[in-house]
Every structure is written in structure tokens, then in C-alpha cells.
Image (cartoon, rainbow, N blue to C red):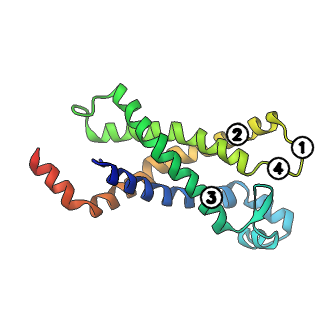
């Protein structure tokens, strides 16, 4: 859908803003929420995070906003450098963008993006949230990475395919409706 580099950057920005917030919520509330409340004795996840002084990242406690900014930076960088270009190329190897139904082709791009970005961001998260207070072990790192991929992949696939990308595409069409209309007239 994005036609030039500026549009690709905006599309990636909108996607990453929504996705990072969704994953931080998913990781803290859905995956780790009960554990955080049990450890701290708090009655809510947010109170548990506040009572322990933030979220454990890089061997120390950081506020949630810092976690979001760090994850946003890496996700946006990965999306622009690897995710978008490689997913388009992968989808183009299977489907011809000119003759394939746009819904099918966009679905192939989304699936390829999830297949690339989920393991990559999970690997970074394994480093970000590694228990640095204990001795470093490559086995622990790899086991954590595999665990994160197993937790994140189903969430990534279904949220991107059915919620995030349809919403991002709608916002993108609203932002660039004049450019899209010009493209349709020239075809």
C-alpha cells in the first residue's frame, strides 16, 4: 500500500506505535500479571509494577514509559530495515503483486512480517529482560528466546492479521487519501 519511502516510514511508525503498546500490555498483564501480583502482594498489575519500582530490564528496574521507548526504538528500526522490505520480497516470491487479489497479497505480507519480526523482537527481548543478577548462560538466553517466541507468535499473528494491520491500513488511507486517489486516477 505505501508507494514511496516517506509513506513506508509513516506506515511503519503507525504500526510500531500500536504494536509496542499492545506487546507491553500483553507481556505485563496477560503473560506475567499474576506472577507480578503474587510476588508483590498487590491487588493489580499496575500496583505490582509500581511497588517493585518499575519493570525489570537491562538488569535494573525501569519505568513503563522507558520500556515502551526502548522497545519502540528497536521495533521501528527492525521494521524499517528488515521487516517491511523482507516481508514484501517474501510475499512477492509466492504471489505476483500485479495479478494477486490485494487482500491475499496484503495477508501474505502480514504473515511474512510476523514470521520475521516475532523471532527478531523476541530475541532482543530475551537480551533486554535477561536475569543479569545471575550468571550469564547462552542456554538460558536461548531457552528464554524460544519461550518468548512461543508466547508471542500466536498473539502477534492474530492481532496483526485481524486488528492492528486493518486499523493501520484504515488510518493510512485516511492520511494519504489524496495520494491514493491520484494513484487510482493514473492507473
Question: In the shown orientation, is residue 68 left or right of residue 3?
Answer: right
Count of numbered tags: 4
Work out whether mark 3 precedes mark 1 in sequence or the reverse, and give the earlier one.
3
Work out whether mark 2 precedes mark 4 in sequence or the reverse, and give the earlier one.
4
Could you tell me residue 17's position as x and y percent?
Answer: 49, 60
Q: Residue at x 59, y 40 (%)?
A: 120
Write down the residue under mark 2.
145
Return the residue found at the far top: 93
Residue 104 figure quarter = top left
Q: Which mark is residue 70?
A: 3
Assign a secondary structure to mark 3: helix
Could you tell me residue 38's position as x and y percent?
Answer: 84, 63
Assign a secondary structure to mark 2: helix
Question: In the shown orientation, is residue 179 left or right of residue 169?
Answer: left
Marks 2 and 4, Cα distance to the nearest angstrom? Answer: 13 Å
Q: How many neighbours does mark 2 have within 10 angstroms: few (below 14), some (14-19), or many (20 or more)? A: many
Using the image, determine if residue 131 lies above or below residue 48.
Answer: above
Could you tell me residue 172's position as x and y percent?
Answer: 32, 58
Write down the residue under mark 4.
131
Work out whether mark 1 precedes mark 2 in sequence or the reverse, and give the earlier one.
1
Amino acid at each position: 500500500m505505501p508507494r514511496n519511502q516517506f509513506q513506508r516510514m509513516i506506515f511503519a511508525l503507525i504500526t510500531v506505535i500500536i504494536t509496542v503498546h499492545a506487546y507491553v500490555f500483553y507481556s505485563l498483564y496477560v503473560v506475567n500479571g499474576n506472577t507480578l501480583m503474587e510476588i508483590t502482594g498487590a491487588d493489580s498489575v499496575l500496583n505490582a509494577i509500581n511497588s517493585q519500582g518499575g519493570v525489570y530490564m537491562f538488569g535494573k528496574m525501569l519505568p513503563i514509559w522507558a520500556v515502551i521507548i526502548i522497545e519502540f526504538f528497536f521495533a521501528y528500526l527492525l521494521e524499517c530495515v528488515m521487516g517491511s522490505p523482507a516481508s514484501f520480497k517474501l510475499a512477492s516470491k509466492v504471489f505476483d503483486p500485479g495479478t494477486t487479489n490485494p487482500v491475499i497479497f496484503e495477508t501474505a505480507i502480514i504473515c511474512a512480517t510476523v514470521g520475521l519480526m516475532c523471532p527478531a523482537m523476541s530475541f532482543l527481548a530475551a537480551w533486554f529482560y535477561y536475569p543479569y543478577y545471575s550468571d550469564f548462560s547462552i542456554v538460558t538466553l536461548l531457552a528464554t528466546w524460544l519461550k518468548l517466541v512461543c508466547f508471542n507468535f500466536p498473539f502477534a499473528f492474530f492481532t496483526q492479521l485481524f486488528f492492528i494491520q486493518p486499523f493501520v491500513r484504515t488510518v493510512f488511507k485516511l492520511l494519504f487519501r489524496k495520494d491514493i486517489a491520484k494513484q487510482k486516477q493514473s492507473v
